[in-house]
Each structure stands twice: as C-alpha cells, then as structure tokens.
Amino acid sequence: MSDLSVRDLVVKYGDFLAVDNVSFTVEAGAFVSLLGPSGCGKTTTLRCIAGLETATTGHISIGTDRVVCPGHETPPERRGVNMVFQSYAVWPHMSVFDNVAYGLRTRNTPSAEIATRVTEVLRLVGLDGYGARYGTELSGGQQQRVAVARAVITEPRLLLFDEPLSNLDAGLRERMRFELLALQRRLGRTSVYVTHDQAEAMVMSDRIILMHQGRIVQEGSPRSLYERPANRFAAAFIGNANLLEATVTASHGDGRHTVTLPGGLTLEGHVATPGWVPSGAVLVCIRPENVEPAPDGIPATVTRVSYLGPVQTVELQAGAVTLRADLPSRHVVATGTALNIRIDASAVVLVPET
C-alpha cells in the first residue's frame, strides 16, 4: 500500500520551473531518498509534501487523504507530517525535555502522558538523562537527536528529512546515518529524505529518486542505480565512473555489444536501459573497482596513485584511453609501473547520452 503519492507535481516561480511534472509513490514504512545536486528541485518537492511550499499544479496524497489537488491545499498542521530540518531548530532557551514535549503541549496532552512519552522517546534516540540540559549544552549530534525526537513524538504518518546531517563533521555524519536508519526501522514510519550526498542515499535508502533540473532522471534501489545507470548524468552522479565515448561496431542479439574506444581498443558490454537499442556513438560506463590487474590483460601504464587506506585509486593509460581503477592497497604500485588489466564484460555498461 502506498503511504505517499505525488503525481504530476509542478512548481513554478515566474518563468522558472523548479519542479517539472514529478510523480512517485512511497510504500508504507519505506525509507526513500530524493537525491540530486543543489537546485534540482528535491527540497522544493519535500516542502510541497510538508505544506511549506505551494504547488502550481499536481496532486499529493498521504495515506487516503488528498492534501494537494487543484484548488485545494490542506494546511501543514493537518497533514500528519513532521519535518527534521538542516538547522535542527533546537530552541536554546528550552530544556531538551521541553523541546521534545512542545508538540504534545500544543495538542493539550495531559502532563503525566507527556512525561511518559518524552522519557520513552529520549531513550529511543539515545538521550536518556539529557532532559534537563539546554540546547547550548549539546553537541551537533545530540541536537540532531533532539530534532528527531521532537519530530517523532507526535507519531506523524510521515517523516520528512531535509539534509539533516549536512552540518555534522564527516565521522559523526557517517555514524548518524546508521543511527537514523535504525531509529526509522524501529518506528516503522514512512520517511522521505532529501540529500545531495550520494553515499548517504546509497547507505540509507530502500529506494532512491534521482533528480536533475526539476525532473526525475531515474529511480530504483541503490544497487540498480549504481549498476544500471539510465544516462550520463545518473552514471556520473552515483558513485565514481569511467565514462568513455565509444562506437558500437557489432551487436550480438543477446544484449551484448562490441564497442570500439579511442585508439582502437575494443570491449564487450551490455545494455542496462530497458528498450534502448544502441547504435553508433554511445557512452561506456566502467566502475573503478571493475578494472583489475590480469597477467594476460590489456597493457596499461600507471600515471597517478592516490592512497586512501584500504584502497588506492590508480589512474591508468591504456593506449589512448585513460581509466581509473580502485585496487587493494596491499598491491603496491607506483607511477610509471606497467600493468596488464582486465575488464569483465558483465561490468561494462552502455549508457545513452541523455
């Protein structure tokens, strides 16, 4: 059953089209990310769901309730939606307890019930014993937990997250990804998460909706977006990729195609986009982890090495083609080293330009 339905959503500011005919659904209990670069329309879409932005046209339903349709916008406070913002908005003049209890108090919840529910939610987000502290006494990660606690305590139908981890340092941001996801799983709340960080979306999401210039470019599981990009933008934005211009020189009738790269290098690859029949000029997408040393492979020369701990990113020159490879750091290589490399045909994906 769909817990959220967005259909034909359009948002215009004068002549500028911020959201261009966006449609998607989110199943009950799922964690879905809207991913894309700044200005792609993801936050505007989220704010339309929350009721903080007015749709030009389109339909939005939460559960069985139509909250946006032509001529009608349900007020934000009647949508059963709570949002965690990038800034957290933890009130510094209130204790943690009062910050979290605020939503219940506006609903005239009895004091005894407030005390019980706040204590339970603080325990849930790992802030047991922090109720008497003030916002200025909390770290960034603790403030983020307060914001989440405040969002979930009123038991909304839908949780919305607008880049809530972007203000944290790298190490804390990585830990909080897993904490947020674990909390969402325990609560079972349908969640929509906006981010420009593709690693964050890959780690946390059941499904990713990739946006660019106000439109949905591709949607699916993190694995499907990574392994089967729909076009150049999807291939470049999700993970690292070697994107090479090539020409189709033979088709084998089983989804496999032979392509020729600059300098005459030939590879076999496959099509990941349903219904697309490549011919002539195409793009070849090869992920760096699929470029491997092999005794009888393609001759190449190492032109640069970047050590990253468990892996090293190696730039290789194979004839007229430059490739990036991610190799285990235990295989020590240096600039100028000659290598033979192998690229499995199953890892070579042919991608449309648009």
Image (cartoon, grey):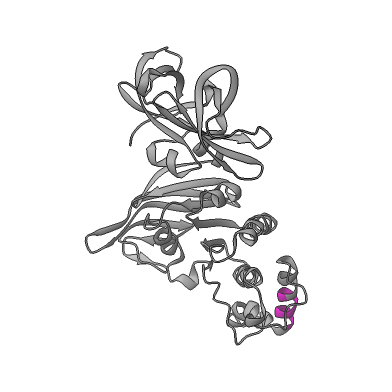
Residue furthest to the right in view is 129
For the magenta stretch, what is the residue range? Answer: 112-118
Tell me the chief SS of the magenta region. Answer: helix
Q: Is residue 339 above or below residue 108?
A: above
Coordinates of residue 214 in the picture (x, y in percent):
34, 52
Position of residue 196 in the picture relative to residue 103 (left or right):
left
Q: Is residue 185 above or below residue 274?
A: below
Position of residue 176 in the picture relative to residue 354 (left or right):
right
Identity of the residue drawn at 51% across and 52% down: 33
Residue furthest to the left in view is 15
Q: Is residue 62 above or below residue 95?
A: above
Query: As rendered, which of 33 and 299 lies closer to the eye?
Result: 299
Query: As rendered, which of 343 and 251 lies closer to the eye?
Result: 343
Query: As rendered, which of 245 and 17 lies closer to the eye?
Result: 245
Quarter where residue 114 is shown: bottom right
Position of residue 236 in the picture relative to residue 308 (left or right):
left
Residue furthest to the bottom in view is 93
Q: Is residue 18 visible?
A: yes
What is the number of callouts on the image? 0
Q: In the rendered image, which quarter contains the C terminus? A: top left
Q: Does residue 317 belong to the magenta stretch?
A: no
Query: As rendered, which of 265 and 95 lies closer to the eye?
Result: 265
Coordinates of residue 315 in the picture (x, y in percent):
50, 35
Coordinates of residue 174 in the picture (x, y in percent):
63, 56
Position of residue 203 in the picture relative to residue 15 (left or right):
right
Identity of the residue drawn at 46% across and 65% down: 50
Q: Is residue 311 above or below residue 20?
A: above
Coordinates of residue 42 in the picture (x, y in percent):
42, 56
Q: Is residue 63 visible?
A: no
Identity of the residue drawn at 68% across and 55% down: 182
Identity of the residue drawn at 62% across and 85% down: 94
